[in-house]
Amino acid sequence: MKKLLCLLLVVALCSVGVYLHGRIAKLFKNEVVVYNWSDYIPQEVLNDFTKETGINVIYSTYESNESMFSKLQLLGNGGHGYDIVVPSTYYISMLREKDLIQELQLSTISNIKYIDKRFLDQDYDKGNRYSVPYMWGALGILVNTDYIDEEISSWADLDNPKYAGKLLLSDDVRDLFGVALKIQGLSPNTMEEEDLRQAQIWLAKLKPRTRVFTTQVKQPFSGDEVHIGMAWNGDALVIMEEKPEIKFVWPKEGTLIWVDNFVLLKGAPNPDNAYTFINYMLRPDVAAKCVQEYMYSTPNTEALALLPEELTGNRVFMPTEADLAGSDAVLDVGAAMRLYSDYWEKLLHSSTP
Ligand code: N2P
């Protein structure tokens, strides 16, 4: 009997020990949980951040605003466990409406002073109450001149039966439909169903010739799986370094421009660490490192000053006003976003003619 009591006591003490260990570990867990676009922050930058601050970065990635948004909606404030996400401007108000993000204490993000005023206090987030810009870029046409002789200058040039099986189109819904709307003279921020129907007709014509719908363009282009297609300028520059026969074109109709931003989620488990992280990412040397790796442009003026002229003078990286003439910023279309998703689904499931 005595033996049994002793054994029970030992078991009880062990359980309490395990329980306390778990609680204490949780209490002292020093981390920040970041959910970001893939290929957007170099691992070295994350490691340096941990070295400097002692804060571990729990990092995971997504491929589109839509997948990030639906995941957050699905998990809700209580369940996502993330501190920071990096939506494009037009998703900031959508996240706000769903009550998924919280106001920032801008005083804790002192490095916001390095951000170009032209990127601050914009209509989509007056006073930057919820967001701080990270990087910006735009869509253009990537062409492998080893295979394609035609002069490419317009989005309409993608519509050529010669490119069947070698064409890549973006699966970023707003970019894809934005292009299809633009070449018909319609607004890429339209909220009209009829406009989207028109856009979808053009895309349905291209669909059977399309090798792949993706924003992950590096692999298909570097493996010569595709010869022409839509690509963001940063990815284009990375590919062109490896394959000089590939050229990037700013289409004459203009393009779609996006800016991605750090936001703090409601229910963020580590808000203080999140502020430290955002402030770190805005440090000019850190922002410059991110640019050098992924070749997207930065709104951080001090970071731009640290970059080589060879890059900042490159029009793929830093398009001129003329390159971007006729371009549009992608804007929040409110409830009409549903139409874009519906027509995208229709396009995906339409049978080929
Ligand atoms: C880089 C992320 C691009 C972000 N892969 C497009 N908004």
Image (cartoon, grey):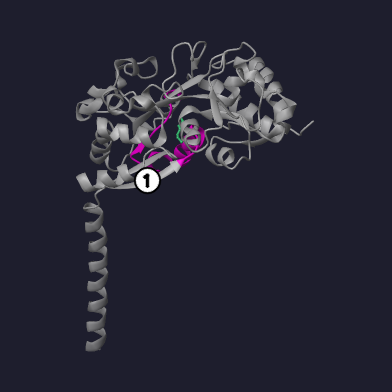
Is 341 left, or right, of 8 in this rendering? right
User: Which element is circle 1 on?
Assistant: strand
Note whether residue 265 is visible.
no
Expressed as whole percent of the image width and height from the top left, the position of residue 177 reads 60, 23
* Residue 299 falls in image quadrant: top left
Q: Quadrant of the N terminus?
A: bottom left
- The residue beneath circle 1 is 59
**Camera-nearest residue between 134 and 289:** 289
Identify the residue at the far right of this view. 353
Residue 160 in view here = yes
- Residue at the (24%, 41%) spot, across then down: 273
Vertical position of residue 40 compared to residue 30: above or below:
above
User: Relative to the observer, which residue lies in front, 334 or 41?
Assistant: 41
Q: Which residues are magenta?
A: 62-90
Residue closest to the eye, 254 or 311: 311
Q: x and y percent of residue 335 in the render?
A: 53, 22
